[in-house]
Amino acid sequence: MRAVPTWAVATAAAAPALLVVGWTVAGARQGPGYDPVRDTISELAGEGATDPWLMGGALVLLGCCYCATAAALHAAGLPSRFLLAVGGVATVALIAFPRPQVGGSPAHGVVATVAVLALALWPAGTALRLPRRVPRAVAASPAGRPPWAFRRPVALAVTAVLLALFGWSVAEVTGGSRTGLAERVAALAVTLWPLAAVLSARRAHRHWTARPSEPPRPDGPPVGPGRLGAGA
C-alpha cells in the first residue's frame, strides 16, 4: 500500500480551515444586510460583495486542496480520485462565473452543482469498484480489508449523508429562509471527508508496514463480491 505523503495531510486539513476562515472574514466585510444564515457563500464572491477576492481566493485554494488530495490519495482508486479532482476544478471555476448582484446565473448554478455532486459522490467511487480480490501489495491489512474510510458501508453511508445535505440546500434555495446555513453545513461536511480519508489511508499504511511479514488469513472478511483466495 502506497504511503500518503505528509503534504497531502496538510492540504486535506487546510481545506475546511480555508472554507471557514474565508466565509468568516469575507462575511465580516459585508454590510449589516448580509445574514450568514439566510445568504449564501456565493454572494461573498459575487458581483455585489464588498471584497469578492477574499472568498474567491479561498475558493481557489480550496479547489487546489481537493486536487492535491486526489493526486496523493492512491488508496481511493482512480474513479474516486477523478471525481474528487473534478470537484476541485469546478470549485476553482466558480470564480469565473460569479453570482450576479441581482437575479441568478445559470452558469454559476451548473458549475456549483457539478462541484457539489462530484464532491458528494467521490466516496462511493471506491465502494462501487467491486474488486474480486485485493493483492497484499495494496491491501490495508493482512486480511485484505481496505482503509476504514473506503469500506463499502462507510463510503456509501457518507455519500448518502452528503447527498442529503445537498438536498437540504436545494430545498432551502427553492423556498426556505436558512439557505446560508444549509449551504455552510453541506460545504463543511464535504471538506471534512477528504481529511478523514487521508488519515484513514495513512493509518492503514502504518499498520501494514508494522506487520509486513504476517500472512493473510484464509478466513478473512470478504473483499468485494468474492473472498481472499477465491477463484475467478
Image (cartoon, rainbow, N blue to C red):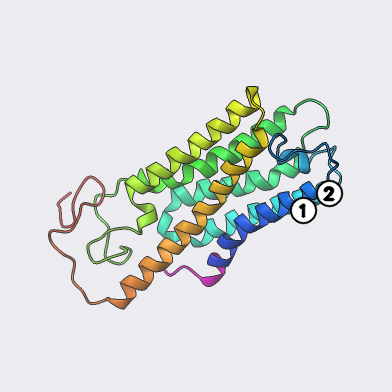
Outermost front residue:
32
As drawn, is 171 to the left or to the right of 163? right
Instruction: Answer whether labels 1 and 2 touch (C-beta < 8 Å).
Output: yes
Q: Position of residue 66 (x, y in %)?
A: 58, 54
Q: Residue at x 33, y 75 (%)?
A: 209
Q: Residue at x 35, y 59 (%)?
A: 147
| Secondary structure mostly taken by the magenta-highlighted segment of the chain | loop
Q: Is residue 50 magenta?
A: no
As drawn, is 211 to the left or to the right of 196? left
User: Which residue is the site of mark 1?
Assistant: 25
Q: Is residue 121 visible?
A: yes
Q: Residue at x 31, y 71 (%)?
A: 208
Instruction: Find residue 98 and report its image quarter.
Output: top right
Marking on residue 29? 2
Q: Position of residue 195 (x, y in %)?
A: 51, 58
| Amino acid type at image mark 2 | Arg
